[in-house]
Image (cartoon, rainbow, N blue to C red):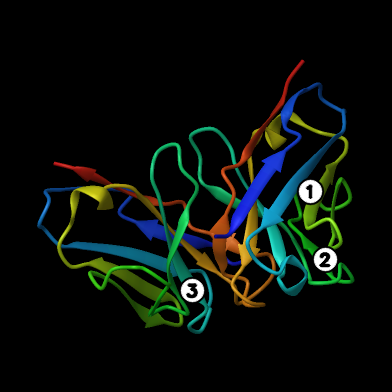
Amino acid sequence: EVQLVESGGGLIQPGGSLRLSCAASGFTFSSYWMHWVRQAPGKGLVWVSHINVDGSGTNYADSVRGRFTISRDNAKNTLYLQMNSLRAEDTAVYYCVRDLKTTNWFDSWGQGTLVTVSS
Amino acid sequence: EIVLTQSPATLSLSPGEGATLSCRASQSVSSYLAWYQQKPGQAPRLLIYDASNRATGIPARFSGSGSGTDFTLTISSLEPEDFAVYYCQQRSRWPLTFGGGTKVGIK
């Protein structure tokens, strides 16, 4: 069974940094593209970032480019999102998402971790 | 950025009725459109990809159609567990984008 378990969320002040982690199990992590998708409270889904199988290729939403960095450790079956210069508008549940075999469709989702940016 | 507009924003229906949800793209996305279902407090679930392909384990009452800029998700006969929010998503161009969602509520 595919499992994606996010951690690292919490309350952080504007301008601060946070690193999210996603522990993957139940599949060959190193064979799959991965993504982060976020959802502000009561709002819709917003794609944040993508990474290819070996980490050599990444993509970002304009709203986070230059502030967020996606990475992965295939030996540890773990996906990361380093978030710097956080803003109030970054407040959201962040989902770790598996790609449906290099398609940019999202076929498995974690339960999410809440990031709250507030003073 | 490709903007996806979903309509209606809210749909009030009874179990057993059919539902038709629309997603319109600001430019052609070919057949590169997916649909997701999200229930309160849960992560989204992939229903349909490439406009009309059901994802693994998705019941046949869910079907997708369309190409170019206009797409439809049809639920043939609503079951109690189908009342949820539905999102469309395109993968034609970066950045990947979602529609604003359609809430299917119980009348």
Residue A102: percent from left, percent from top: 67, 77
The amino acid type found where label 3 is placed reads: Leu
- Disc 3/disc 2 C-alpha distance (Å): 21 Å
- Disc 3/disc 1 C-alpha distance (Å): 24 Å
Badge 3: few (under 14), some or many (20 or more) residues near its Cα, within 10 Å? many
Residue at x-position 50% and y-position 47%:
B43
Residue beneath label 2, please? A58
Position of the C terminus of chain B by quadrant? top left
Residue at x-position 87% and y-position 33%:
A17
Residue A93: percent from left, percent from top: 61, 38
Name the front one of labels 3 and 2.
Answer: 2
Q: Residue A97 carries which label?
A: none
Question: Which element is circle 2 on?
Answer: strand
- Labels 3 and 2 within one chain: no
Q: Residue A64 carries which label?
A: 1
The amino acid type found where label 2 is placed reads: Thr
Quarter of the image where one finds residue A12: top right
The amino acid type found where label 1 is placed reads: Val
Residue beneath label 3, please? B33
Residue at x-position 18% and y-position 42%:
B106
Position of the N terminus of chain B by quadrant? bottom right
